[in-house]
Amino acid sequence: MTKILLLNSGPHSDASHGYKLAIETIAAAQIDNVRIVERDLVQSPIPPIGRDYAMAITSHTPHDAKEFDWSERLIVELEQSDMLFIVTPMHNFTVPASLKLWLDHVIRINRSFNSTPQGKIGLMQDRPTFVLVSSGGFHVGERAKQLDFLTPYLRYALASIGIKDVHFFPLEGLVFGPEAVSKTVEEARLQLREKLSSALATASAS
């Protein structure tokens, strides 16, 4: 069975262009015996990092302690996936608060990464990861009028826990009318299908 974890971190939930495209592409790939685990980080928010967690993380508290309940749940959910899809808007140049909170729970010392003199060493197995980034304006290419902090940040954050096979697909100009939306969705569709097909071919050959 191929298990796909689909994180949706935008306010439009299952009505977003990114979510619809992710579901459509997975279905079109005709993956045998696939199971999609969906987590909507806005509709079903996870709790913020609190003092109990902060105290536990610095006091060698066991992984199964109640202070890590949510962190452990999210890490195990990720560990059990073969692929990761992240559907996210760009909010103020970077990831929205809902996705940042998921990262704060998942990036945990001595659990998903080890700290060494050379920096963080990821403890999680790499897996194909597809990130669909929606924005009203443009953040890639010649039409970009703003800096993109989302892509380098998210790539670095995921790499810190061992996930390095990460591919980004921009859905830009979504406030410029139906024609602009149709164009950017079609471009992302073709790129996403190609990368997903390549990942599936690699997985079947290994």
Image (cartoon, grey):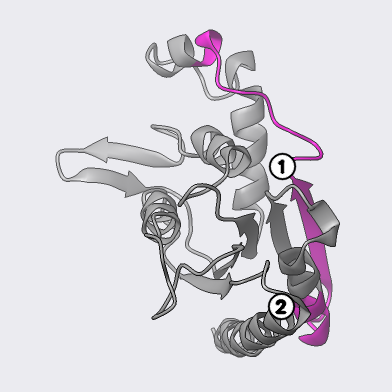
Q: Position of residue 120 (x, y in %)?
A: 29, 43
When asked about the image quadrant of residue 187, the answer is bottom right
50 vs 32, left or right, is left
Task: Count up the numbered dots.
Answer: 2
Q: Along the horizontal axis of the image, is 37 left or right of 49?
A: right
**Few, some or many residues within 10 Å of mark 2 (<14, 14–19, 20+):** some
Q: Identify the residue under disc 2.
A: 181
Span shown in magenta: 24-53
Mark 2 element type = helix
Looking at the picture, which amino acid does disc 2 mark? Val
Pick the front one: 83 or 140:
140
91 within the magenta span: no
| Residue depicted at x 42% and y 71% | 144
* First of labels 1, 2 by sequence position: 1
On the image, the x and y values in percent for residue 67 come to: 59, 15
- Whether 70 is drawn above or below 148: the answer is above
Q: Which residue is mark 1?
A: 41
**In this picture, residue 127 sits left or right of residue 22:** left
* Coordinates of residue 64 in the picture (x, y in percent): 60, 22
Q: For the N terminus, which image quadrant? A: bottom right
Determine whether, in the image, residue 43 is placed left or right of residue 109: right
Work out which residue is located at the far left of the displayed protein and give it.
117
Whether residue 77 appears in this view of the structure is yes
Residue type marked 1? Leu
Q: Nearer the viewer, residue 51 or 36?
A: 51
